[in-house]
Amino acid sequence: MAAHEDGATLWERLERPAPAPRQTLSPHRIATVAVGVADAEGLDAITMRRLATELGVAPMATYRYVSGKDDLLQLMVDHVYGELELPADTEGWRETLRAIAVRTRELMLRHLWFAQLPPSALLALTPNRLAVSECSLRSLSGLGLDPDTMMAVANTVSSYTHGVVSAEIAMRQFMAGQGWSDEQQMYQSLAPQMTYLLGTGRYPAYKGYIYEGRRKHDPGWQFETGLDYVLDGIADRIRPQ
């Protein structure tokens, strides 16, 4: 995260007392408005000028809180992670990691732009994002794992979650771009290609899935089933031998 001209990071600046008793702006209001624009129109709609217009302030007013779009995206990321209800400390590690994964999927599906964030924002260290990581790591303490292994386990579940949900969002956006209102239209449009490829006989396992699979239209089931297999594998590794 880039430092401000006075050397302070975004989060240090935002925790300072407001310079005046009455402020029309606040970090929460800026983030709420920016997230609303992104939800409705996508990340490309987010500019400092557009933000100022939506807030009803002069463009320079927002720079008292965010120094540019990079800061703004990080503020939005933190705001969205703040929506994620963290499991109680009394939950076990598996229940905690599973709940965070399921709730992260719900969060990403509410904010589709989250899957298109640039790396600088996606990987940004923000208070609410670190709170999620802290919860995951804390749930793994006491299992006899070293810190590196704990982080590897937490990152494995997080990577599965973000990867699968990003693919789900990409599919939604692809269908919307093609003008397909549902998956049935997609399958009908792709039928000639699918018929040819499966007819070659080179993909018998995939053909079996296409003709025998019953959960092709249930991404929630697919996500949670894959997640349970990931957690099963972790549980097998950490189970006392």
Image (spheres, rainbow, N blue to C red):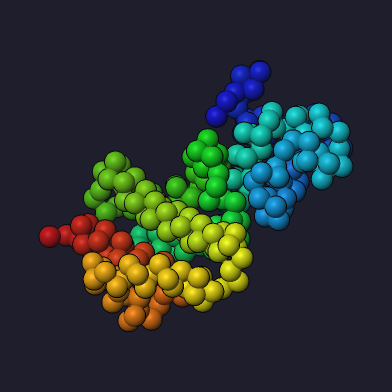
Q: Which residue appears at 72% of the width and 38% of the height?
A: 47
**Residue 178 at what x, y percent from top left?**
58, 62
**Image quarter of the N terminus:** top right
8 left or right of 219? right
Q: Is residue 97 above or below residue 120?
A: below
- Seen at 46% across and 57% down, the residue is 167
How many marks on residues? Answer: 0
Percent from the top left, x then y, of residue 161? 42, 57
237 to 131, vertically: above or below: below
Q: Is residue 86 visible?
A: no
Which residue is depicted at the point 54% across and 59% down?
174
Rendered image quadrant of residue 148: top left
Can you name the residue that lies furthest to the top here? 6
Q: Residue furthest left?
A: 241
Q: Residue at x 22, y 57 (%)?
A: 238
Residue 57 x %, y %? 86, 37
Residue 15, compared with residue 182, is above or below; it is above
* Along the line of sight, the residue nearer the viewer: 213 or 218: 213
Q: Is residue 18 left or right of residue 219?
A: right
Q: Which percent across, then down, holds residue 164?
A: 42, 59
